């Protein structure tokens, strides 16, 4: 029993030493610029949420955030992470985000759906307007929706003109 305990402790200490060693990646952000934008969907100020653009060290831009829609009296929450942003020209950009949406306005067992969100708009001088469309994969949800957005930059710089 004593040999098993010593063997176990030796393996445990070896595991800790190798897995807790200093990581080769530097700590801190891997992006060189960021901007936070406050989006309002379909001209409804109750559908307001913040989305964050980040410019990576390689020059690529991604966005993470949450798109919010209404279903009757409930909200449909659509979070997405690191969606690649494409600049069509210096002020028009587009991105496609995807993830898992949630809406408590559906019966239990039908409250989640994967989604694909497509957004295109003009972002200039701290203001933006554009169009969006979204598709859902759950057979219990409407297959798609579309609308408009307006947005304002609330923090940051270095990505949009």
Image (cartoon, rainbow, N blue to C red):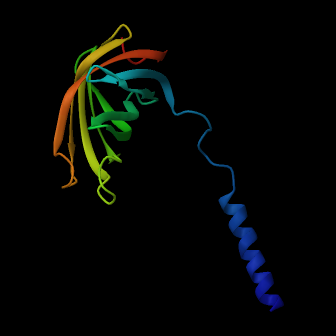
Q: Quadrant of the C terminus?
A: top left
**Is residue 38 placed above or below 145 in the rendered structure?**
above
What residue is at 80 percent from the left and 82 percent from the top? 6
Please give the name of the residue rendered at 50% of the width and 25% of the height, measured from the top-left corner: 32
Residue at x 16%, y 46% (from the top left corner): 143
Residue 4, picture quadrant: bottom right
The spot of residue 99 in percent (x, y) is 33, 46
* 132 w.r.t. 12: above or below: above
Direction right: furthest residue: 2
User: Relative to residue 114, is residue 85 depicted above or below?
Assistant: above
Where residue 18 sits in the image (x, y, percent)?
A: 68, 62
Horizontal side, residue 80 vs residue 119: left or right: right
Q: Can I make out residue 78 in this image?
A: yes
Judged from this view, the residue extending furthest toward the bottom is 1
Quarter-of-image position of residue 43: top left
Q: Quadrant of residue 14?
A: bottom right
Point out residue 77 in the picture as x, y percentages from the top left corner: 36, 40
- Number of dots carrying numbers: 0
Q: Is residue 38 above or below residue 102?
A: above
Can residue 122 be seen in this snapshot?
no
Looking at the image, which residue is at 34% across and 11% down? 127
Side of 110 where 65 appears, left or right: right
Front-lying residue, 129 or 90:
129
Q: Residue furthest left?
A: 143
Horizontal and vertical percent position of residue 39: 36, 23
Split into 4 quadrants, where in the image is the N terminus? bottom right
Q: Residue furthest front?
A: 73
């Amino acid at each position: 029993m004593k040999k098993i305990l010593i063997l176990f402790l030796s393996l445990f200490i070896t595991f800790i030493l190798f897995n807790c060693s200093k990581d080769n990646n530097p700590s801190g952000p891997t992006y060189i610029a960021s901007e936070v934008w406050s989006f309002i969907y379909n001209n409804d100020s109750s559908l307001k949420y913040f989305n964050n653009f980040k410019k990576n060290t390689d020059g690529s831009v991604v966005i993470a955030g949450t798109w919010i829609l209404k279903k009757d009296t409930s909200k449909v929450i659509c979070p997405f992470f690191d969606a690649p942003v494409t600049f069509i020209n210096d002020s028009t950009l587009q991105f496609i985000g995807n993830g898992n949406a949630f809406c408590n306005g559906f019966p239990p067992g039908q409250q989640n759906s994967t989604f694909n969100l497509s957004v295109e708009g003009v972002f200039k001088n701290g203001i933006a307007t554009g169009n969006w469309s979204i598709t859902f994969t759950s057979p219990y949800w409407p297959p798609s929706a579309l609308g408009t957005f307006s947005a304002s930059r609330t923090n940051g710089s270095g990505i949009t003109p």
